[in-house]
Image (cartoon, rainbow, N blue to C red):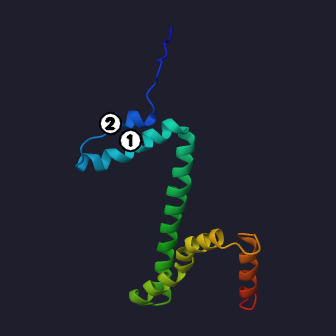
Amino acid sequence: MIVEEENPPTASEAVEENESNGGFCDCICAPIYWFKMLSMELHWSFVFGVVAVYGISQGLGGALARVGTEYYMKDVQKVQPSEAQIYAGITSIPWLVKPLWGLLTDVLPIVGYHRRPYFILAGLFLTPSS
């Protein structure tokens, strides 16, 4: 016969029991305890899905794309490393602007709409470039 506890410990209490005073071991163990707490609060399959999508797909895909791009720039186009870094910086500008764009559309609605007018304006500005 299984007996349940009257007040099972919450995830934060379980993590507090495992926390140490710091040091090198804490740098290694803290993320493990955090994942353990996250798995107790959410289902393990959700945590696995998030890690798989964001960690493996985007991280591995970006790394493989970077290897191919660096090979192409260095061996095919004969681009100097400093110039290649400038090109990489220019191509990363949209990812840097993305959070600012989201904040702008959330804070400054146009005619009561948050995103639709900005998409229309962007389309009108980008139409001549194509």
- Label 1 environment density (alpha carbons within 10 Å; few <14, some 14–19, many ≥20): some
What element does badge 2 sit on? Answer: helix
- Label 2 environment density (alpha carbons within 10 Å; few <14, some 14–19, many ≥20): few
Q: Left or right: 90 with respect to 111?
A: left
Give the residue drawn at x 48%, y 73%.
66
Give the residue drawn at x 48%, y 12%.
3
Q: Is residue 108 above or below residue 129?
A: above
Instruction: Give the labeled residue for mark 1.
Output: 33
Q: Left or right: 121 with respect to 55?
A: right
Q: Looking at numbered disc 2 in the image, what kind of residue is underneath it?
A: Asn
**Location of the C terminus (image quadrant):** bottom right
Name of the residue lying farthest toward the top: 1
**Residue 122 percent across, percent down from the top left:** 71, 81
Label disc, if present, on residue 18 of the rendered structure: 2
**Residue 119 percent across, percent down from the top left:** 73, 76
Q: Looking at numbered disc 1 in the image, what kind of residue is underneath it?
A: Tyr
Observer able to see residue 129: yes
What element does badge 1 sit on? Answer: helix
**Residue 124 percent across, percent down from the top left:** 76, 85
Q: Are marks 2 and 1 in contact (CB under 8 Å)?
A: yes
Give the residue drawn at x 55%, y 59%.
57
Quadrant in the picture for residue 79? bottom left
Quadrant in the picture for residue 12? top left
Residue placed most toward the observer, 87 or 31: 31
Label disc, if present, on residue 92 of the rendered structure: none
**Residue 30 percent across, percent down from the top left:** 34, 46
Counting residues from the start of the chain, the first of labels 2 and 1 encountered is 2
